[in-house]
Amino acid sequence: MKNLCILILIIFAPCLTANTQAQSNSYADLTENEKADFTAGKIDEITTKISGKKYAFNSDFKLQVSKYVDAYSKRVGTNRKTGNFAEDLNLVLQRGSESAPAINQAFDKNGVARLAGLYIAMIESEFNSTILSPTGSSGLFQIDKLRAKKYGLTLKERADVEKAADLAARYLKDNQNYFAENRMKEFLAILSWNREAKKINFDINFKFMSDSENMACAVCGLTGSPTRFDRQFQTEAVKYIPKFLAAAIIGENPQNFGLGTKPLSTLGAETSQAAPDNNDVKEAIIPQELIGNNGKQKTSLEIMKAQNFAVPMDFFDLAEMNLTKELVELPLATETYVLEVGGLAADKVFTKFNFKDGATIPAAASESQRKMKELADNFNLDLNNPNDRKQIRLRLLRMINPKAKTVLEEIAQQYQAKFNRPLRVTSLDRPLDYSIDLNKVDAGSFLVKENGAIPPHCSGLAFDIAIKNLTVEEQNFIANILAEMERNGKVDGIRETGSSAAFHVFAL
């Protein structure tokens, strides 16, 4: 009996080793059969997340998805920064990470799966809001004029991520209701973003498909024999769901493809609508420590001024602070916090700023330009590319003093442990010229009055926690953490009110 057991182990050991190795390898290292198995398994995961169901997709359909996954995977690490739908996928997913919190919030609010919005945006524009189609569609979701008008958006508002995402979520919800009797209603609604819902309904029910195809897998029946349908279906719609699933597989499993982002559906806290009810907590209670005029912050800033702290006047100065490690860049999202910064980040050419001359472009051979070029090279970005210039600004606005980073992480860890979702942080560092621009659109921002002042966020020691998406219980929880930190001399905190209500935190 002992010999028999040994023989069985010898026979099966290679299989066990191979399976373990396949699971640990990146997608690029898998064999063709392993890639097919990987894709099939991920298709089931994606459909379950969207609709709570697995579908009987046939082998031909899965093969189509696999082809698109392969095509995406070949774009990872190419360093290509130009060309619509041809860039390095790292850039695509980085843009996706910046748009995901707004998309996720809009879809949560409308009761539609986050993945539906995220990966429609990915296949429509690859999260590039500047793309304009030959037919006039524009924005992240490539919304056409008729759809914008029907759902109450102006043509300019199509470029607004939050408003476009809300339109997309409402549109999909309407069409899920339209296909309510079909067990694939969620995916037929996704397809309707590309092909009119009435045409899809006609395709399914009246002329082209047998009852067996319709019952087993409507999407399989539609995509299996595209020549039965019109030209638009044959050239566009037939590809839509396979492309969508491939995009979702990439975006939800970035680690398998050598991408450095988080799964896009995990970015952004739940909306206040989805937050748990806390009937025992009726109102926010502001501790005495958070009421006042930030006296400790003012004292610290006066000391910094006396010590000749060099206020970052512009993004050139922030670039130098990045290179010298005076400030550290935070990731866009972690398990404990999500950053929502850089709302005014532009793609224009970088300029130097001072109060006497205003904004000027330094000479190409200047030290400022040299350091900005060094930073751009470190980021693998091109200063001549407008999109890359915006990405540089966004990354520089994600920097903070290491002391403040420690405080932020401590608060976020406690919040995540209590409420099981990441904390939304809305402001970190800023250069002075950005602060002046912010004064023009946000009356609640720190007013820059004179040369020599040190606005708190220009010090690198301040950050804000938005209140608008916090429940009363969450507000009280954070307020108590900050009050305790203030008593221990770690921070100076205040609860700001008004349209930009936030907990303002200054690390001491």
Image: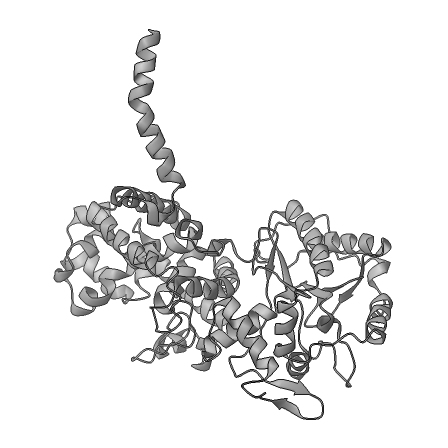
The quarter of the picture where residue 327 lies is bottom right
Indicate the quadrant containing the N terminus: top left, top right, bottom left or bottom right.
Answer: top left
Q: Position of residue 48 (x, y in %)?
A: 38, 46
Q: Is residue 280 left or right of residue 383?
A: right
Q: Nearer the viewer, residue 338 or 376?
A: 376
Left or right of residue 333: residue 381? left
Determine which quarter of the picture holds residue 170.
bottom left
Name the residue nearer the viewer: 304 or 449. 304
**Residue 252 x/y as whole percent:** 43, 52
Q: Position of residue 282 (x, y in %)?
A: 73, 54
From the image, which quarter does the C terminus lie in? bottom right
Q: Count of labels shown?
A: 0
| Residue found at x 32% / y 77% | 133
Q: Residue at x 31, y 20 (%)?
A: 10
Relative to 8, is 100 on the left or the right?
A: right
Q: Residue at the top extreme?
A: 1
Given residues 392 and 279, the one toward you in this image is 392
Figure check: 486 above or below 19: below
In the image, farthest residue toward the bottom = 357
Residue at image x 61%, y 52%?
A: 336
